[in-house]
C-alpha cells in the first residue's frame, strides 16, 4: 500500500472515530432532553449570538453589527464576527425551507452547529496525536479529548458563542502544522486556520502569535525542512486575513482601528507578518544561512513591533484598561471566566483542580522529553501548551485551550503504557496503565473537584432551591410572562439582558459586554440610586417595565452595594407607588413591575 493510501486510510479511520464520539455525545444530550435549549445556564453570549443571527435574517445588514435592542437608544456596536453568524444562519435557512418552522430550525441549528464543531475538534485532536506519537495515541486522544471537550461545555447544544470555533481552528492549525512535512497543502491550510482564529476573536491572539513564532523559529533553525512550510503558512495567513477584511469590514470602516475586534490593525499586522515570513522563506539571500534567517526574522519582528507602537499604541494597553471603575468593581471582577489562577486558589481550590490538573500533568510530561531527543512536534505542542497555561493563569478562560492541548501529550503517555502492557503483561503494569488513563481524563478531576466542593461548601449556592425553582432566572419559561407583554424598554440587571432579548421583543439597557458602557452605567445609576433617581431615569428613557430577579447573585451584589437603593428596596418588598406589579409574576423567578408614568 502506498504512503498516499496509508494517509487516506488514517484520515478515514480518524474521521470515523470522531463521528462515533460525536454521536455518543449527541446521544447523551438527547437522553437528557437537550435541556440547554430551554435553559442557557446563565450563558449570555450564546443567547445574544442567537439574537444577532435572528436580526441578520430579519434584514439587518451584513456589515451592521449594532445591537439595537441593548444599551441606550440606538444601541451599540458588538465586537463579534459575522464569520460565526453566517453558518448558523445558513443552517436555520435550510431547515426552515425544509420544515416551514423557524422555531424548529433554530433548535436544529443550536444542536447541529456545536456538534459539527465538536466532531471537527475531536478529529483534529486525533490527527495531532497521530503526528505526535503515532497510531497508538489516536484512540486515547479521541477518548480523553472527547471527554474533555464534552465536559468543558462549549460544545453543548445551544453553544453558539465563538469560543468553540476558536478552539476547533486552533487545534486544526496545530494538527496541520504537525503534518506539514508530509503533506504539501497542510502548511497553507494551517496559516488559513490561524488567520481565521484571529478574525473570529482577539482572545486567541496569543495562540496565533505562538503558532506564527514557532513556524518562524523552526525555519530559522532548519531551512531545508521548513522553508516551504514557512512560506506557505505565511501566504495562507496573510491571504485569508485580506479576504476576511474585505468580506466582513464595511469599506467605510477600513480606516477605523479596533483593538477588540478584527479591523485594519489586525489586517495590517497579519499582512506584514505573513507576507514578510513568506518573502524571507522565498528569497534565497535572506535565508541562506542560519544567521541571516535569524537576522531577517528579527528585523521583521522589529518592523511589526514598531508599526504597532507608532501607529496603534492604544492596542498595547490591557484589554479592560479603560473600563469604568464601577463596571470593573460590579461586573468584571465577578465574571467567573475572567478570574486569575491566584484568585481561584484563594476562593475556589476545587475549581483549580478541575481546570489545571491535566494541563500541569501534560507540562510535566513535556518537560521530561527535554532530555530525550527534542523533536519538531515537541516544539509546536509544547509552545502552545505553555502559552495556553500562562493565559489560563491570567484568566481562567484560557484553561479551555490548555485542557485541549494537554490531550496530545497525555494521549502519547497512555499509548506508551498500552504498549508496555502489550509487551509485558502483568497486574502491576495493568494497574499503572489504568491509573494513567484515569489521571489523564479531565472529567475525573472535574468530578472529584465538584464532589469535594459540595462536601465542604455549606452555602448551597445553586441555580435553584432543589425544588425546581429557577432562582438564578436562567430558564426560558421564567421569561414567558415578559414575552407576552407589548414591546417596551425594560430595566433589568445585566445578566438578564441577553435572555430578555432572546425570549421577548423588548429592549434593555444593561448587558455584560464591555462596549455597552453607557447602558450598563445607566442601569447601575437606576438600581443603586434612590427611588426618586430611578423614577427620573425611567421617565427620561421611556422605560415601561422593571424586571427583578431576587435570587440572582448580581441582584444580591448590587443590593449589598447600595442597601438604601432602588433595587435593594424592591428586593425587600418596598415597591414605589409609581410601580405596579404585573399580575401573576409576584413571587416568580422574574418579577415584573409596570412603570406608571402618570403617577
Image (spheres, rainbow, N blue to C red):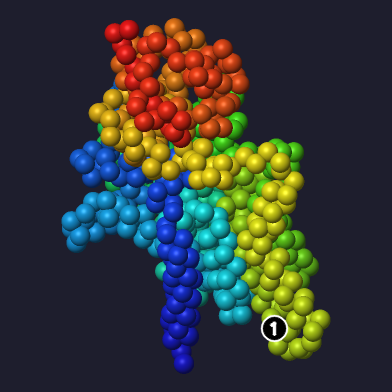
**Would you identify the image quadrant in which residue 27 lies?**
bottom left
The relative height of residue 426 versus residue 138 in the rendered view (above or below) is below
The relative height of residue 319 versus residue 214 in the rendered view (above or below) is above
Residue where numbered disc 1 is placed: 419
Q: Is residue 510 visible?
A: no
Nearer to me, 8 or 531: 531
Q: Count every numbered label the image shows and give the total.
A: 1
Q: Position of residue 97 (x, y in %)?
A: 18, 58
Q: Is residue 402 left or right of 479 when viewed as pictured? A: right
Image quarter (top left, top right, bottom left or bottom right) of the C terminus: top left
For mark 1, give the secondary structure: helix
Residue drawn where x is 50% and y is 19% of the image: 573
Q: Position of residue 242 (x, y in %)?
A: 35, 48
Residue drawn where x is 32% and y is 13% of the image: 596
**Would you identify the image quadrant in which residue 417 lies?**
bottom right
The relative height of residue 410 versus residue 570 in the rendered view (above or below) is below
Nearer to me, 182 or 436: 436
- Of all residues shown, which one is farthest toward the right? 428
- Of all residues shown, which one is farthest toward the bottom? 1
Q: Is residue 97 left or right of 496 when viewed as pictured? A: left
The relative height of residue 502 versus residue 575 in the rendered view (above or below) is below
Q: Position of residue 230 (x, y in %)?
A: 50, 61
Crowd around label 1: few <14 · some 14–19 · many ≥20 (10 Å):
few
Residue drawn where x is 24% and y is 59% of the image: 95
Q: Position of residue 11 (x, y in %)?
A: 45, 77
Q: Is residue 333 left or right of 200 when viewed as pictured? A: right
Amino acid at each position: 500500500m502506498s504512503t498516499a493510501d496509508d494517509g487516506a486510510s488514517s484520515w478515514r479511520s480518524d474521521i470515523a472515530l470522531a463521528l462515533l464520539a460525536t454521536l455518543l455525545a449527541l446521544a447523551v444530550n438527547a437522553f437528557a432532553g437537550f435541556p440547554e435549549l430551554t435553559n442557557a445556564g446563565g450563558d449570555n453570549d450564546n443567547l445574544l449570538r442567537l439574537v444577532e443571527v435572528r436580526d441578520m435574517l430579519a434584514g439587518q445588514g451584513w456589515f451592521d453589527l449594532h445591537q439595537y435592542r441593548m444599551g441606550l437608544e440606538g444601541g451599540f456596536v458588538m465586537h463579534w464576527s459575522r464569520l460565526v453568524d453566517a453558518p448558523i444562519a445558513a443552517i436555520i435557512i435550510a431547515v426552515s425551507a425544509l420544515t416551514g418552522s423557524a422555531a424548529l430550525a433554530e433548535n436544529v441549528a443550536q444542536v447541529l452547529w456545536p456538534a459539527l464543531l465538536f466532531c471537527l475538534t475531536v478529529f483534529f485532536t486525533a490527527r495531532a496525536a497521530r503526528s505526535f506519537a503515532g497510531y497508538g495515541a489516536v484512540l486515547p486522544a479521541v477518548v480523553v479529548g472527547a471527554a474533555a471537550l464534552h465536559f468543558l461545555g462549549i460544545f453543548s447544544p445551544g453553544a453558539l458563542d465563538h469560543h468553540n470555533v476558536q478552539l476547533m481552528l486552533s487545534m486544526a492549525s496545530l494538527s496541520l502544522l504537525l503534518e506539514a512535512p508530509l503533506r504539501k497543502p497542510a502548511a497553507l491550510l494551517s496559516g488559513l486556520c490561524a488567520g481565521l482564529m484571529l478574525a473570529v476573536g482577539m482572545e486567541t491572539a496569543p495562540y496565533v502569535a505562538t503558532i506564527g513564532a514557532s513556524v518562524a523559529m523552526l525555519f530559522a533553525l532548519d531551512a531545508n525542512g521548513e522553508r516551504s512550510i514557512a512560506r506557505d503558512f505565511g501566504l495562507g495567513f496573510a491571504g485569508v486575513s485580506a479576504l476576511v477584511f474585505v468580506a466582513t469590514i464595511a469599506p467605510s470602516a477600513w480606516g477605523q482601528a479596533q483593538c477588540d475586534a478584527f479591523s485594519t490593525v489586525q489586517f495590517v499586522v497579519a499582512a506584514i507578518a505573513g507576507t514578510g515570513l513568506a518573502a524571507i522563506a522565498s528569497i534565497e539571500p535572506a535565508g541562506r544561512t542560519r544567521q541571516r534567517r535569524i537576522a531577517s526574522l528579527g528585523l521583521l519582528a522589529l518592523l511589526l513591533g514598531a508599526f504597532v507602537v507608532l501607529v496603534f499604541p492604544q492596542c498595547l494597553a490591557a484589554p479592560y484598561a479603560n473600563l469604568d471603575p464601577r463596571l470593573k468593581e460590579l461586573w468584571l471582577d465577578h465574571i467567573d471566566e475572567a478570574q486569575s489562577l491566584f484568585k481561584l486558589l484563594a476562593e475556589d481550590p476545587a475549581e483549580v483542580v478541575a481546570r489545571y490538573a491535566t494541563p500541569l500533568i501534560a507540562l510535566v510530561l513535556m518537560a521530561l522529553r527535554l532530555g530525550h531527543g527534542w523533536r519538531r512536534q515537541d516544539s509546536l505542542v509544547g509552545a502552545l501548551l505553555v502559552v495556553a497555561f500562562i493565559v489560563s493563569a491570567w484568566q481562567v478562560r484560557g484553561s479551555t485551550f490548555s485542557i485541549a492541548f494537554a490531550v496530545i501529550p497525555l494521549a502519547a503517555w497512555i499509548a506508551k503504557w498500552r504498549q508496555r502492557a502489550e509487551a509485558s503483561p502483568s497486574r502491576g503494569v495493568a494497574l499503572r496503565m489504568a491509573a494513567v488513563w484515569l489521571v489523564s481524563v479531565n472529567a475525573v478531576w472535574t468530578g472529584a473537584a465538584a464532589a469535594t466542593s459540595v462536601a465542604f461548601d455549606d452555602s448551597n449556592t445553586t441555580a435553584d432551591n432543589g425544588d425546581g425553582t429557577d432562582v438564578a432566572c436562567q430558564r426560558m419559561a421564567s421569561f414567558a410572562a415578559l414575552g407576552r407583554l407589548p414591546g417596551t424598554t425594560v430595566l433589568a440587571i445585566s445578566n438578564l439582558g441577553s435572555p430578555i432579548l432572546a425570549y421577548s421583543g423588548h429592549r434593555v439597557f444593561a448587558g455584560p459586554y464591555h462596549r455597552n458602557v453607557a447602558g450598563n452605567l445607566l442601569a447601575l445609576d437606576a438600581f443603586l440610586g434612590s427611588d426618586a433617581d430611578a423614577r427620573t431615569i425611567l421617565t427620561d428613557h421611556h422605560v415601561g417595565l422593571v424586571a427583578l430577579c431576587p435570587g440572582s447573585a448580581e441582584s444580591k451584589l448590587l443590593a449589598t452595594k447600595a442597601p438604601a437603593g432602588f433595587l435593594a428596596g424592591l428586593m425587600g418588598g418596598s415597591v414605589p407607588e409609581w410601580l405596579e406589579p404585573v399580575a401573576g409574576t409576584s413571587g416568580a423567578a422574574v418579577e415584573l413591575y409596570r412603570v406608571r408614568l402618570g403617577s
